[in-house]
Amino acid sequence: MDSLTQIVLGAAVAEAALGKKIGNRAMVWGAIAGTIPDLDVLANGFMSPIDALAFHRGITHSFLFEIIAALLLGWGVFKMYESPRHKWFGVVGWSILSSAIGISILILGGFGLMKTVIGLLFLAGSGLLIYKRYKRTSYTSPKASIMQWQWMFFLSLITHPILDCFTTYGTQILLPFSDQRVAFNNIAVADPAYTVPFLICLLIAMFLSRTNPNRSRWNNAGLIISSLYMIFTLYNKTRINTIFENSLRQEHIVYNRYMTTPSILNNVLWSGIAETDSAFYFGQYSFFDKQKTFKLMKRDKNNPEFAVALEEDPTLKTLRWFSDDYFAIERKSGDSIQYYDLRFGTFRVKPSDPDNFVFKFILQENPVGNFTLLGQDDGPRDANIGEVFKMLWNRILGNVEEEFN
């Protein structure tokens, strides 16, 4: 899921594991551990786009990696706090981290007045926090064993890929034994209904003393609420599957397989796609639709122009693996090829737009006959973000007339 959610989850499970012994340090280290698997994106600058696509949510999201990383991190942090110079490790580390974040805010904001003020305030606040936490005479080292640190890191690390398994994107949690992407397709990669209550509970717990019994109650409340919502999405998916199956049956469509997945930022609007021998049938359904059915559209599979390449070209084979063979491919013009990952459904920026698949890739056909991935097509560059969210909101509310007229 998104980075904020992984940070919150990592901090919360670390607090549950070790918060009573080490206080807010558990949340801090848990938040750091919760982001570590996604640092695989740093390798993008050293890989081709197709290799980067295959690498993300790969080995750093595997069960084996989390075990090894937890053992090393637990040992390293324990040794750091045992060192008589550990306060200065913290001063240097937090100074580098806070400076990097503050400078990033300034640069990304283009040095506009508001972003400049926010960046400077962040730097000033971080400096004050470092001074208060590491210069005070009452500072003490956390009292936790190596095994306790390792257990805390393991929980914060392993919950990251487990959470990713519930999304459509999936994760290769079984590497290096299998490259199967485990994906349950029951929650969007970003869902405020999961994250916001969880975050509020964690923030309240953060400002309570580690000896305050209400601290663990608030933290546990966040874990329970988020878990209950996840259970709801699993139940909701079974309900959506039944509606999709009924929709296919009403259209007399004999399918080989199908999948359903929620749209971004919610669990109300769902996409469904079914595969037959010759075509894909896809559509959307919202809780607020007047008719309890998916209105289905068809996309033919047969494209003899790419038949051989789809079986032999390494780039196309990787894309097929990534999209679980839910795909369409077409030539746009000359050597420009577009590859559609059909799992994420379609979305229109305007009612007058043609059906547009959310996830698509731009390919180039080389003179020798092989293909190169140039990148992902994120949609029209002139799209108004406000207009996009307005259309998404309207569709969630069941305004199907706008979608199909």
Image (cartoon, rainbow, N blue to C red):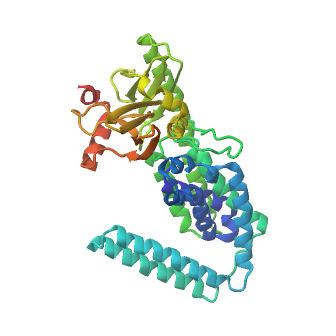
| In front of the other: 84 or 282 | 282
Q: Which residue sits at x=32%, y=30%?
A: 398
Above or below: residue 361 compared with residue 43:
above
Residue 157 in sight in this render: yes
| In front of the other: 348 or 94 | 348
Query: Where residue 405 sits: x, y (%)?
Result: 23, 25
Extreme residue in the left direction: 352
Q: Which residue sits at x=53%, y=81%?
A: 130
| Residue 212 position by quadrant | bottom right
**Count of labels in the image:** 0
Above or below: residue 122 compared with residue 389:
below
Query: Where residue 75 sits: x, y (%)?
Result: 75, 69
Residue 303 in sight in this render: no
Extreme residue in the top direction: 252
Query: Where residue 335 sits: x, y (%)?
Result: 35, 39
Query: Where residue 36 sits: x, y (%)?
Result: 59, 60
Is 278 left, or right, of 113 in this rendering?
right
Above or below: residue 380 compared with residue 246:
below
Is 378 left, or right, of 203 in this rendering?
left
Q: Which residue sits at x=27%, y=74%?
A: 113
| Residue 360 position by quadrant | top left
Q: Which residue sits at x=32%, y=68%?
A: 109
| In front of the other: 53 or 287 | 53
